[in-house]
Amino acid sequence: MRFYCMLSLLGQHTLSIVRELGDFGVFSSRSFSAAVGSRKLGRRVVRAIYEQGVRCVPVIVIVGLFTGLVLGLQGYYVLNKFGSSGLLGTLVSLTLVRELAPVLAALMLVGQAGSALAAELGIQRNSEQIDALETMGADVYAYLISPRLIAAVLVFPLQSAFFCIIGLLGGYLSGSVVLALQPGVYWSAVFHAVHPVDVRECMIKAVIFGVLTIAICAYNGFNAHHRKSSSGARAVSASTTRAVVISSIVVLAADYVITSFLV
């Protein structure tokens, strides 16, 4: 009897996951298609770029700088044991460009811009603002979701590139200013290590991370009223938390999948 109960619960959870994945796919496709022919889309995209780009620059600078500092410090001591400290620029640049920059930049943007988006849409749903827009005949997908997705395609690669630059500067400060590595040796290694294929991988990851995370955050905030376990402010809080957690997991999982195809 217990076996059948467990099997029934497993089936219910599996069907729930499949149903939610289908709803998410429909939501994302409607959000992108709604951008076609939308009026005043450019103005809303610029505002979304400001929210995801300008407002998130401080956290990108701080995290990127300390990531580069730690990479430079740890990398120098490890490489110095093998007499290869001159390869510090190679280590820092490839680690940042191929992996850490797109992943950490995406996680930071999820923590700030993604959580704010999920909370904003959840509050709008909770206060019936979205219902009012639908009653007036407005396309809520074109008005609320599409600009954020389009902005993510532009902002996430730019923020990842900015993260790389700040991280390389942090590696230089650790390796050449604090430690004994010559600046010319560091920057020469960086110049010879990074190739267009590495930059392409970074940009591909950034675009995919941006679309996935912003879509997940928007989906959870937009459907906050569908949560059965809570309502009102608790539903908004739960949806925001769920959006950030799922987005972070998806970034790490997608990073592995993309890397496995591009390596």
Image (spheres, rainbow, N blue to C red):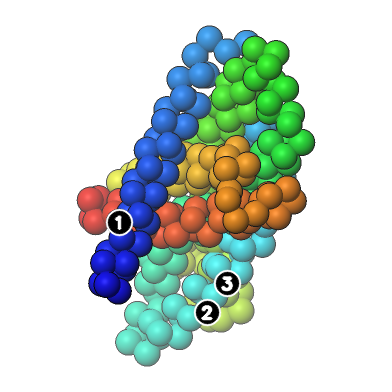
Frontmost residue, 141 versus 195: 141
Q: Which residue is mark 1?
A: 11
Which residue is drawn at the image coordinates 38% and 82% (left, top)? 79
Q: Residues within 10 Å of mark 3 (few under 14, many from 20)?
A: many
Under circle 2, the secondary element is: helix
Q: What type is the residue that disc 3 sits on?
A: Leu
Frontmost residue, 125 versus 9: 9
What distance separates the C-alpha of mark 2 from that of mark 3? 6 Å
Q: Which residue is mark 3?
A: 69
Residue 140 picture location, percent across and down: 61, 23
Residue 204 picture location, percent across and down: 37, 42
- Residue occupying the far bottom of the picture: 81
Q: What type is the residue that disc 2 sits on?
A: Leu
Residue 249 picture location, percent across and down: 45, 59
The quadrant the N terminus occupies is bottom left
Residue 61 picture location, percent across and down: 65, 57
What distance separates the C-alpha of mark 1 from that of mark 3? 48 Å
Q: Which residue is mark 2?
A: 73
Which residue is drawn at the image coordinates 40% and 84% (left, top)? 78
